[in-house]
Image (cartoon, rainbow, N blue to C red):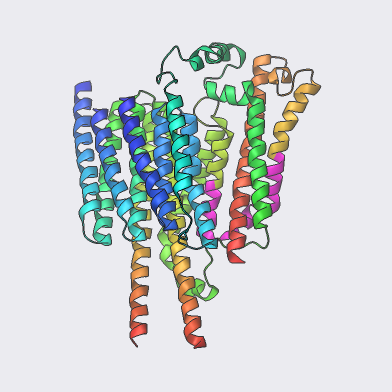
Amino acid sequence: MTILLAVFLLTMLVITAVAIVRTRDLFAAVMLLGIFSLLMAANFFVLDAADVALTEAAVGAGISTVLFLGALALTAARERESGDSRWLPLVVVVIMAATVVYATFDKPALGDPNAPVHQHVAPWYLSETPRLIDIPNVVTAVLGSYRGYDTLGEVFVVFTAGIAVLFLLGSGRPGELFSRPPDELSTGGLKHHLIPRVVGKLLIPFIILFGLYVQFHGEYGPGGGFQAGAIIAAGVILYALLEGETRALAALPESALKVMVIGGALLYTLVGVVCMLMGGNFLDYSVLSTNSVAGQQLGIILIEAGVGLAVTGVLLSIFHAFAARATA
Amino acid sequence: MFITVSIAILVTMALAIIRALRGPSIYDRILAVNMFGTKTVLLVSVVAFLFGRPDFLDLALAYALINFIGVLAVLEFFQSRSLRRELGAAQQRDSL
Amino acid sequence: MSLFLDLGSWVLFGIGSLLLFIGALGVLRLPTLFTRMHAASLTESLGTIAVLTGIMLQAGLTLATMKLLAILLFLLLTSPTSSYALANAALLARNRDQTREQADRK
């Protein structure tokens, strides 16, 4: 059943991907990318990777569409025809694809218990997590503790990406993402948006609440800082869409976003440094408390909070940067 | 019985993709994406029970809450763009 | 007891699947945007209710049922809203096109 579902979803995924590449209408491409993301999340879900699926859902459903549209507002709506010959790229791609397909023949079958990935460290993670960290979601344990160093790297990748976008787009004056001409603002538009405004405002507290749940329930169910950050950012973006950028920035000003981005990344690093000062290795949370299990749990909660802060801050900064640029 | 429903939802999703590919207008595509989002929520809920993992329902909850933002953003985008275009055309007429 | 629950689930799943499929057919086959929109939004609400209630009957009184209730509530709030916003935007765009045509004709 898993195989059937996965094959069906992957087939639709391939069709959508080909359509995205073929279309010249960039707006249609953005819409199809929305479908692509939904299919991808469903696929991850079918393969039992709920944490990854939740990330894809949190980012793909709202934020990436909004950011793509923000980019579209800055460029043309159609892709330009390129006159170059496409044969050489096609040959390269075909050779690469054939190599990758050939390489998959050596891969063990899906779910094969003798596959190296199930023999190497995975059994150790599964058997030792209850004793060492004592949380039900092993993914969070791997992400936060065993592989804490890699996750720190990811946070800094997000951090760097945010800084890079801010450098490129420059955060000038605040502006509306999809600006209306001023005289239309008083007459048209908003009056017709009464129902979305009421429903949207009703949903915002639930979105933020759900984000906090994902943040703090990550040790027990699917979730964690990355997903929670994206969901909370989506809630604030919804507010910005309904009420305008100025009011969203009044609620959560750019200076606060900067504090969140830098503070989140710093919090993560500081936890590691404190571990070293208390006599352990970098990011070895066992020393944080007298009881090593409690120390591990405390460490994971702290670094997840850092991740959540940094991701929310970066996503919202990028959103505001696009908005400021679209108005200028 | 969960299998029957999931097959029905998958077929619905496939038909929605055809509509999204065909267009013809932008609004048809938005309609298809919106429909696809709701169907994904249903598929995830059904599959969570098909595989006996009801704690994975969080994903469906996330989609139910967030999907709406994308659609709203698209509509805002088009209304503001056509308004701006309108204004540009009006200015051109005035200057002529 | 569980027989009745199963029976109820079957009936609800049947209704839900049928409605979803009819809605999808309508979206694919009907001639204009607004007819397609009506096919999608009308069937979607009842289909969603049927399918999610069917799952709830299987889940019993658990945390999962509460989550399903929340999902149902949010879907019932958001999907008509987005349908409304979509229809509204499409209608406004069409009206604008018409007035522009009239202005051009003058």
Residue A140, placed above or below residue A321: above
Write the start and end of the magenta stretch as one range: A234-263
Q: Is residue A239 magenta?
A: yes
Across and down, in percent, residue B42 comes to 33, 38
Residue at (43, 36) in percent of width and height: A41
> Residue A319 vs residue A17: left or right?
right
Residue A221, placed above or below residue A16: above
What type of secondary structure mainly makes up the magenta span? Answer: helix
Tally the marks.
0
Across and down, in percent, residue A131 comes to 59, 11
Looking at the rendering, which quadrant does residue A294 occupy? top right
> Residue C2 vs residue A69: left or right?
left
> Could one spot residue C72 in this view of the protein?
no
Residue at (53, 54) in percent of width and height: A239
Q: Is residue A195 magenta?
A: no
Look at the image and tell me in which quarter the N terminus of chain B lies.
top left
